[in-house]
Amino acid sequence: MGVVQEVKDGKFVENSSVQSLAKEKAKKKMGNSNLDKDAFLQLLVAQMKYQDPLEPTSNTEYISQFATFSELEQMQNMSATLELSRASALVGQTVLMKVTDSSGNQKTVQGNVDYVIYEGGKAYLSIGGEPYSLDDLDTVADKKYLDAYKVAVDFMNIYKKLPKLELLSLADQENVEKLEEILNGMNEYQKSMLTDEDLENAEKYIKEMKKILAEQEGGKDPEPTEPDADEDDK
């Protein structure tokens, strides 16, 4: 049986069956992805087949449509290439992803990009074995920076637990010793995450605690002092 096409007022009526036929072919070709050149040509043929025979579309218009689509396709290909290149450059980098779940709740995922998956015209970053859309990328950070930032945060968390310097006591010994341990393990880059005032105050707390401990042990001075000239002569 042939295809029956409705005619109204001397014009063919493009019903939903005709439209869906071309769209369905395009979907099967593309796997429900974006419209490609073959699918566009199928739609163009369908348009030519069911055009109004009394007012046919000019060849110039068809050529213009095809030229416009070709230009759009080239732009899409270029965009896809740039997206893949951008995603590939993130392999090995530490990133922060802001992901929205099915309930609309947003969460932050941090980790290293192990590899990139490119599927259906979209790039996905594999973090901890889970794929995340490149569209969810929020921040790219160097691991050195993140490590330094974490050390600075640990430093400040302990620093803020300490009382005023004049109120420092043996009860604060554990926190001061942790502060000293962190400070001694920091390199110059990590120290740059802190202000000079914070570093100077930390040194004051450490020195004051050593003084308190020395007094507790019998008044010994924990800091070695330079011998007097008179004592050298003796």
Image (tube, rainbow, N blue to C red):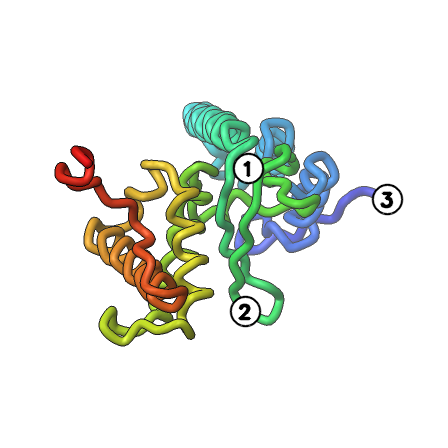
- Find disc 2 in the rendering and name its residue: 105
How many marks are shown on the rendered structure? Answer: 3
Residue under label 1, please give it: 53
Question: In the rendered structure, which amino acid carries the disc numbered 3?
Answer: Met
| Mark 2 in CB contact with mark 1 (< 8 angstroms) | no
Q: Residue at x 54, y 41 (%)?
A: 52
Is 205 drawn above or below residue 21 in the view shown? below
Residue 69 is at least partly visible in this image: no
Residue 74: tell me if it is visible: yes
Instruction: Decide which of tag 1 and tag 3 comes sooner along the chain.
Output: 3
Task: Please report contact status of discs 1 and 3: CB closer than 8 Å, yes or no.
Answer: no
Identify the residue at horizontal 39%, vertical 61% (top origin).
176
Residue 57: percent from left, percent from top: 47, 33
159 or 86: nearer the viewer: 159
The structure residue drawn at horizontal position 40% and vertical position 70%, both measured from the top left corner, is 172
Q: Tell me: 136 left or right of 187.
A: right
Q: Which residue is mark 3?
A: 1
Q: Residues within 10 Å of mark 1 (few under 14, many from 20)?
A: few
User: Looking at the picture, which amino acid does disc 2 mark?
Assistant: Asn
Instruction: Kindly report which numbered mark, 1 or 3, lies closer to the viewer in this rendering.
Output: 3
Sequence-wise first label, 2 or 1? 1
Judged from the image, the secondary structure of the residue bearing numbered disc 2 is loop
